[in-house]
Image (cartoon, grey):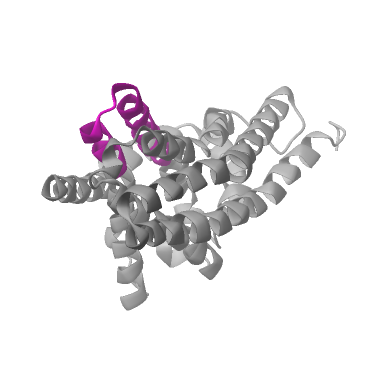
Amino acid sequence: DQALFALLVFAQAAIWGWLYSTRGIVITTLMSAISSRPRVLAAALANAAPQMSLYGDIPKSEMLSLWIAGNVVVPVHHSASVGIALFAYAARSAAAFRLALSFEVGEDVLHFCQMAHVALYPASTTSCAGPWRYLSLQAWAFVGVHHLIGLLAGTAAAAEPVATWGEAHLFAALLLAGGLVCYLKAPLQLLEDLSTPSALGRAAALIDVLGLLVMTLVRAVFYLPLALSLVRRAFAELGDVSGYYFSVPILVAAPLFNVASIAMHAPYVMARVREQLQPADL
């Protein structure tokens, strides 16, 4: 089972490395479609700028490709993992749960490899560098902690008997789903500059608010009771060593990441709301 899981992880890293590549056929095809429509391109770039600024100083030449990676490929990736994890919960399937986990752990491996490549070759412009050469140290730390949690907890959860635990299936699905709502506004970002007060702008701002609310509920309200339940079960059924192993990513690193993610996104969301509260003629 562990050998199969390892194969799944490396397969996921290879597949999503291709899908995330700004030079791959998926992103270049979408870029071509958007770029062929000047109004759509202008809207996409205008809306991408404040969003991408959360992560670093992104050159305009890379803005569209990274926006597509972050707002199209990422939600597809996370949605697939959530859907399979929920199926695993409903069917009580350890095999399906390992498949769901392989999405996240494979992405962890992929991004850590890209980060290592950029750390060793800062001037690299190959697809192996991913977006990391443009991201701030804060973004490196933020995303790095996210992937460290996924790598440690996800790898351990794929092993017996944790892979058979229904609450582990639900816990993983809930965490991965917590940030998905905000991506619902991506199609609106292609229609007009959403910083201008308008019906579409208000709809996008509402999605942002709902996304932040869901993220807060999942990561600041629902998270701790579920995490404590899992860790208690790990201590009770697997012993102290496994219990402490699960405690570090789940009860130490993850809560810090949860608070940081909310604090990072809240100012962005509030800025989008303030834009829509301005008089329309300004």
Q: Horizontal and vertical percent for residue 253?
A: 50, 60
The x, y position of residue 76, in whole percent, is 38, 34
Q: Which residues are magenta?
A: 72-101
Q: Say whether residue 254 is left or right of residue 152.
A: right
Q: Does residue 254 belong to the magenta stretch?
A: no
Q: Would residue 170 appear left or right of 260 to someone viewing this image?
A: left
Q: Residue at x 57, y 31 (%)?
A: 185
Q: Position of residue 251 (x, y in %)?
A: 51, 56
Residue 120 percent across, percent down from the top left: 31, 77
Q: Measuring 63% from the left and 41% from the top, which residue is drawn there? A: 221
Q: Is residue 54 visible?
A: no
Quadrant in the picture for the N terminus = top left
Nearest the camera: 174 or 139?
Answer: 174
Residue drawn 73% across the image and 28% down it? 202
Q: Main secondary structure of the magenta part?
A: helix
* Count of marks overlaid on the render: 0
In the image, residue 75 lies in the stretch drawn in magenta:
yes
Does residue 206 appear left or right of residue 79 in this picture? right
User: Which residue sits furthest bottom?
Assistant: 120
Q: Is residue 206 visible?
A: yes
Q: Residue 47 lies in what quarter of the image?
A: top right
Q: Is residue 136 left or right of residue 83?
A: right
Could you tell me which quadrant the C terminus lies in? top right
Q: Quadrant of residue 242?
A: bottom left
Q: Nearer the viewer, residue 98 or 191?
A: 98
Residue positioned 43% across, 45% down in the render: 230
Taking 82 as reference, is 4 above or below it? below
Frontmost residue, 180 versus 256: 256
